[in-house]
Image (cartoon, coloured by chain):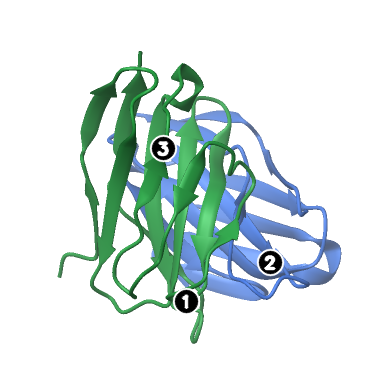
Chain colours: A green, B blue
Amino acid sequence: IAGITQAPTSQILAAGRRMTLRCTQDMRHNAMYWYRQDLGLGLRLIHYSNTAGTTGKGEVPDGYSVSRANTDDFPLTLASAVPSQTSVYFCASSDSETSGELFFGEGSRLTVL
Amino acid sequence: GIQVEQSPPDLILQEGANSTLRCNFSDSVNNLQWFHQNPWGQLINLFYIPSGTKQNGRLSATTVATERYSLLYISSSQTTDSGVYFCAGGGSMDSSYKLIFGSGTRLLVRP
């Protein structure tokens, strides 16, 4: 069982470039989330989606966009990367029809130079 | 929005010792979870516990929703318990299941 797959695992990116982080889940969870983790700041919610076709803003949405065309995929796009977006990005999913227990992917480490 | 505070921020234990980690939240929650992030960065869900008490092996958790706090107990700690423990809460006024995380408790268990 794969659970949640994120790609790439790690990426170095020049400032100003466009970047899409991919996230796919095979658990048929209705809700999906993107968090970023920075040293000393814990995890902060960027965007979320309660169900396919809907998205919402989290705590730190500026500079990021998401889409939810289907249940399984929830890509995160940085339209024009800046150094402050250097972080570890975690995708997560939950089944809000039952417990809402959150499951995480392995993370994507992004460095913007 | 909801705010989540964890204490202590850092904790060092000798193997075999017990510990209690605390999580306070600023508003009512209907979704409260505890996570462990191991030294390799993996985030593992420990408990979904919006209220009451649960136990899983050497770990147990208690949430007192009316007083807006949750406790995570680690008994007979092992070196593999090292890492960062996060609690996260979701507001009862929010129809989504998005969670807001605390800053974590960094635990080091020494052999």
Residue pushed farthest top? A113
Residue B103 at what x, y percent from top left?
61, 37
Front in this rendered view, residue B3 or A93: A93
Chain containing mark 1? A
Give how far apart the Cα atoms at labels 1 and 3 are: 22 Å
Check the picture and name the quadrant holding the C terminus of chain B.
top left
Determine the secondary structure under disc 2: strand
Within-10-Å neighbours for mark 3: few <14, some 14–19, many 20+: some
Residue type indicated by callout 2? Thr
Determine the secondary structure under disc 1: loop
Residue type indicated by callout 3? Leu
Q: Is residue B53 above or below residue A34?
A: below
Give how far apart the Cα atoms at labels 1 and 2 are: 28 Å
Residue A71 at what x, y percent from top left?
34, 75
Q: Does residue A105 appear to the left or right of B92 in the view shown?
A: left
| Discs 1, 2 touching: Cβ within 8 Å | no
Chain containing mark 2? B
Say which mark, if any, is on residue A78.
Answer: 3
Q: Which residue is mark 1?
A: A51
Say which mark, if any, is on residue B63.
Answer: 2
